[in-house]
């Protein structure tokens, strides 16, 4: 799992690639929570290059969503087909704002 | 021309009918609500459509499949529900080619799509909304994806603003289905032919009486008015139907029951001598349209949900689980002694603790709603998980836990589950063993455990449980199971 971070105006953009599974989740969760604590309350997690996600990966997304809710912030996701499948299977699409690509997500934010 | 169908209503206004399904999948005159939209599209010559879904998206995909049944190709995407149509269209992976047709599939309209399209062709404006006798038909032809007028499709916009001169007003009617009374009335209207052009399933058995296949009913059941009865229903010859009555598939009605202006949803049982007027019946839910009272009938002699009566299978499954619990207890007897010795040596002060957890047994609460009950789950205060959770075998024997299931949680934790995705985990029974218990460390976050159970519940099957049992046997051979 590779995590890259950049800022676009006041939006934190986190780009994940590879497998987003239990083994890496602790570290990624800490990085994302740090970003939320230090950021402006706008977070874009781009998972277009994520090839596999499990329930632990989804738990990291839910934790980020809850933290941003406390800050009255906004979480936007960009998903790959495998990520989208698990999000729909677990009905998380009813809470997450999902865009097809990073440009569309940044434009909406 | 591309077709986009919005079927993303959250359905709060139709509760309790939408507590286990979504608006597009509610029955309207013998068919699913969204089926009427698909049939209208096919009639107008469309062979493909993209559907935007929100709650219970997986149920809609399962019900409609790839659309082959209608000779169509259907594709799907999901949203948070009831969002702005403009924003949702921008979010689509593949933008529709202009001009395109966009409509709601969670309302019902008379079959006037062809007429509308003919008139829309000649209109020289970027967006052509349809009005059916002056009412928003949630249907428009769009020549520009970024057109703000798309807001007339937004469910949350009460009365969209657009000049009547910029819309096409044709003869037809729209049922918004925005309340239980509106849903009830739309069903009666459809059965009575007041929503023109809908294809109503069944054969005409007598004047005003339409029956689905394999249905047993007599013409004398209809004393006056119109009745539409679905497939596989059984009506006792003494049942009296009057006014307008719509009965869904797989319904049984006992002798001398009387139904007037009533809608009965599929899989319902109505007992002997029951008298229903202006009502919606769904299983053992009785919704009175005149008073809007929603009653849960606990007496199964009066009303019952036939989906919950697979008693033989359920009892058999429960018995097998309990027998497996007894077998496991016998096999584990030497371990109990080991657990006692370890607990004595490690925690002389508190060798054993008890937690109150939510089990699988169900009891009716004061309001007649079946609720899962709590049970006392014991734990040896030792580190090895195999020994620690031995007392939970007793809960398998008592039927509070299944051998394989989701992680049992406290009643307080269960009550915190409010969102639809959180409640998904509750669909699986709680168990002694399961993917969450086997794969996640005890210290994993609550979200992680909940999501693991959501995935388990979404994929719940006998095969998955058998695999889990095999995994448990493998886990028994690991150091982690014995050291913790």
Image: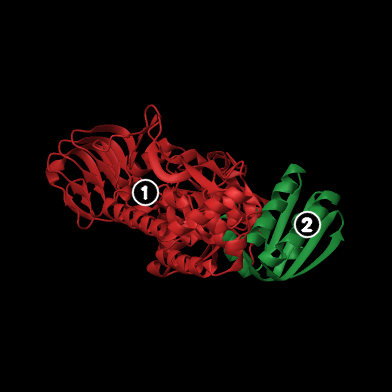
If the image is split into quadrants, where does the N terminus of chain B sit?
bottom right
Given residues B44 and B277, the one toward you in this image is B277
In the rendered image of this protein, which colour is used for chain A? green
Left or right for A75, reference B240? right
**CA distance separating discs 1 and 2:** 50 Å
Given residues B346 and B167, the one toward you in this image is B346
Residue at the image position 58 percent from the left and 65 percent from the top: A85
Visible residue check, residue B84 = no
The x and y percentages for residue B170 are 47, 49
Q: Mark 2 — residue?
A: A30
The x and y percentages for residue B46 are 46, 67
Q: How many marks?
A: 2
Q: Mark 1 — residue?
A: B28
Residue at the image position 80 percent from the left and 61 percent from the top: A13
The numbered mark at residue A25 is none
Visible residue check, residue B284 = yes
Q: Are marks 1 and 2 in contact (CB under 8 Å)?
A: no
Q: Name which quarter of the figure residue B263 lies in.
A: top left
Left or right for B323, reference B409? left
In the rendered image of this protein, which colour is used for chain B? red
Within 10 angstroms of label 1, few (less than 14), some, or many (20 or more) residues? many
């Amino acid at each position: 799992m590779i995590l890259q971070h950049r800022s676009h105006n006041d939006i934190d953009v986190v780009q994940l690639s590879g497998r987003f599974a239990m083994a890496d989740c602790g570290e990624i969760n800490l990085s994302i929570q740090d970003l939320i604590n230090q950021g402006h309350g706008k977070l874009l997690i781009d998972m277009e290059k994520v090839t596999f996600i499990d329930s632990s990966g989804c738990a990291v997304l839910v934790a980020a969503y809850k933290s941003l809710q406390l800050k009255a912030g906004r979480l936007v996701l960009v998903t790959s087909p495998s990520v989208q499948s698990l999000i729909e299977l677990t009905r998380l699409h009813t809470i997450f704002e999902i865009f097809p690509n990073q440009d569309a997500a940044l434009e909406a934010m | 021309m591309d077709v986009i169908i919005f079927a993303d209503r959250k359905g709060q206004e139709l509760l309790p009918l939408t507590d286990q399904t979504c608006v597009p999948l509610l029955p309207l005159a013998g068919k699913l609500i969204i089926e009427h939209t698909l049939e209208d599209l096919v009639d107008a010559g469309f062979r493909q459509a993209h559907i935007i879904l929100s709650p219970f998206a997986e149920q809609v995909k399962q019900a409609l499949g790839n659309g082959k049944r209608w000779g169509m190709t259907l594709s799907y995407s999901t949203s948070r529900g009831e969002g702005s149509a403009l924003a949702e269209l921008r979010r689509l992976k593949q933008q529709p080619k202009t001009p395109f047709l966009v409509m709601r599939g969670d309302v019902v309209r008379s079959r006037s799509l062809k007429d509308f399209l003919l008139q829309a062709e000649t209109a020289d404006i970027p967006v052509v909304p349809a009005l059916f006798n002056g009412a928003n038909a949630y249907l428009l032809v769009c020549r520009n994806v970024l057109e703000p007028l798309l807001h007339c499709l937004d469910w949350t916009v009460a009365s969209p603003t657009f000049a009547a001169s910029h819309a096409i007003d044709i003869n037809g009617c729209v049922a918004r289905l925005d309340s239980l009374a509106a849903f009830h009335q739309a069903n009666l209207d459809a059965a009575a032919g007041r929503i023109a052009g809908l294809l109503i399933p069944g054969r005409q058995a007598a004047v005003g009486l339409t029956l689905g296949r394999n249905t047993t009913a007599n013409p004398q059941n209809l004393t006056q008015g119109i009745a539409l009865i679905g497939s596989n229903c059984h009506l006792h010859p003494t049942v009296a139907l009057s006014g307008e009555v719509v009965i869904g598939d797989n319904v049984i009605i006992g002798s001398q029951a009387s139904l007037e202006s009533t809608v009965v949803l599929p899989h319902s049982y109505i007992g002997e001598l029951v008298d229903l007027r202006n009502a919606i019946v769904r299983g053992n839910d009785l919704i009175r349209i005149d008073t809007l009272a929603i009653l849960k009938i606990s007496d199964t002699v009066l009303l019952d949900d036939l989906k919950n009566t697979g008693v033989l299978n359920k009892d058999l499954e429960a018995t097998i689980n309990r027998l497996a619990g007894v077998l496991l207890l016998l096999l584990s007897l030497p371990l109990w002694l080991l657990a006692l010795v370890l607990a004595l040596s490690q925690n002389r002060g508190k060798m054993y603790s008890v937690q109150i957890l939510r089990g699988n047994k169900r009891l009716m609460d004061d309001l007649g709603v079946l609720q899962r009950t709590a049970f006392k789950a014991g734990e040896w205060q030792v580190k090895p998980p195999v020994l620690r959770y031995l007392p939970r075998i007793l809960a398998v024997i008592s039927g509070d836990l299944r051998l394989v299931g989701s992680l049992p949680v406290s009643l307080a934790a269960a009550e915190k589950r409010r969102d639809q995705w959180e409640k998904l985990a509750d669909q699986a029974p709680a168990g002694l063993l399961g993917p969450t218990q086997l794969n996640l460390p005890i210290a994993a976050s609550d979200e992680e455990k909940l999501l693991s159970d959501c995935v388990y519940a979404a994929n719940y099957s006998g095969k998955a449980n058998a695999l889990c049992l095999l995994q448990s046997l493998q886990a028994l051979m690991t150091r982690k199971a014995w050291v913790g």
